[in-house]
Every structure is written in structure tokens, then in C-alpha cells.
Amino acid sequence: MPPRAIPGRGGGAPGGAPGPPPPRGGGGAAPPRGPRPRRARRDGDDAVLELDGGDEVRGDVVVLATGRRPRTAGLGLEEAGVELRADGAVAVDDRCRAGDGLWAVGDVTGVAAFTHVAKYQGRVVADNILGRDRRARYEGVPRVVFGDPEIAAVGLTAAQAAERGIRTLAAEVDLPEVISRPWTYERDPRGHLGVLADADRDVLVGAWAVAPQAGEWIHLAALAVRAGVPVDTLLDQVAQFPTWTEGYLQALERLDR
């Protein structure tokens, strides 16, 4: 059953990716507008969400996303000279420094609340403490929903690129139609991949995938976004057959350059 979103809780594709098409084999209905969830229950194999006003939404599962905020209240950080932003996050510079001899890493900084970002910030801080001048960069940080299939994205969405005045080119491919790996991986092949390129600089600025193991092979796009790899270089790369990575070649070839 196609997923449906309740308004007022955020929209678009997970992780900020350009929106994937609805799952194959199901068209879905437009999500309800206005009413709020009141109660969730099981009805046989269905998960049922009751809305105020009497309507119901049925699906396979109900997913509740609550979000996260830095918990810095009551720690006396202000007395230590630490500046807190309006959302409670510790204000840090590009070395993750919060003050003289003070450093902050992870969710408390309010920068991309992911474990892999916290680990990266920790490495940046360690290098600076040891006397190496290292600055944190957050271009090309992947974001993944570990579902079935996995949902992975990196870089900018088309809307974000437009806000920055970047002229873009986009392309999408249905992976079972263009590469062999979906057919060697499972009996009911699935998968979709999209890429977004800067039309003027001719580099990849975003990508997303909804497919098995997408959290693994999104890293080719992540490195390309971070390093500003030219699209021509990506097109000239030889991908192992049969792998999911071959999908990038198929998508990039469809950019209207």
C-alpha cells in the first residue's frame, strides 16, 4: 500500500531528497488536508490512523517522526562562556570550537543530527586539539532511511538549488529497466535513482535513490558532490557489472546537457 503523509508534519521525500515516484503497482490517493491524527490501531493486517473529523487512513504501518532538539538547558553552558543559539544548540565555528578550550560535537551543535556527522566532528576536534588546523565541511553528507527498500540522498534538492540561484539539470531512472542488478538481487526487482547537476559548473550537486542497499552505493554520489567531480569524469568511470552503481551512468547519460 502506498505511503501517505499527514499534513503539518513535513513533506517531500525523506531526507530532503527530490521526490521519488509512488511505488510501482499503486497510484495512491492524495493525503488528507487539515485533520490531525487522534488514535492509531490495528485492524487485521492494516494499521489504521483515526483522524479528528471521523476519517481514517489505512496502511501497512504508521510511522511517527517526532524530531530532535539539542538538550542544553540547565548545564550552565552560558556561565562557561558558551553561546547558545535560539534553538538551544551550541554555537560552534568551522573547527567545532565553542569557546576558548571548549569544543562541541554531535546533535548538540544542531548540525545534521546524524551519528556519522558526530563521528566526523569528533575527528575534526581531535585534529585541532593535536595542533592540526582542520575545518569541518558538510557538503556531500549522506542521509539514509534504513527501510525496505532503503531511501538514500545526498546534496541539494532541486528547490534548495533554486534558492541558491543554481541552474540545474535533473534525470531519473527506473533501475530494473536500465540495469541488471535488480534482477540478480531479488525476484521482484525494484529501485529508482535520481541525479541533480549544476548546469553551469557541470558537476553533481545532488542525488537520491530508493532501492535495496541504497545506503551503501549512495556514497559514490556523496564523494562526487563533496569533491565537485565533473559529470564527464563520472560518465567515464567503469562500474562493475552487475551492480547498483551502474545506475549512475544510466541516470547521468539522461541529463539534457
Image (cartoon, rainbow, N blue to C red):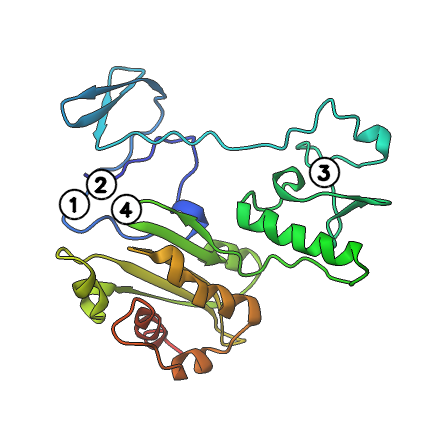
The residue that disc 1 covers is 26
The residue that disc 3 covers is 90
Q: Are marks 2 and 4 in contact (CB under 8 Å)?
A: no
Identify the secondary structure beneath mark 4: loop
Identify the secondary structure beneath mark 2: loop
At label 4, the amino acid type is Asp
The residue that disc 2 covers is 2
Quadrant location of the C terminus in the rendered image: bottom left
The residue that disc 4 covers is 148
At label 2, the amino acid type is Pro
Q: Nearer the viewer, mark 3 or mark 1?
A: 3
Give 41 or 11, whichever is nearer the viewer: 41
Give 4 or 238, whichever is nearer the viewer: 238
Q: Residue furthest front?
A: 130
The CA distance from mark 3 to mark 1 is: 45 Å
- Give percent across and percent down for residue 159: 47, 54
The CA distance from mark 2 to mark 4 is: 13 Å
The CA distance from mark 1 to mark 2 is: 6 Å
Q: Residue at x 50, y 32 (%)?
A: 67
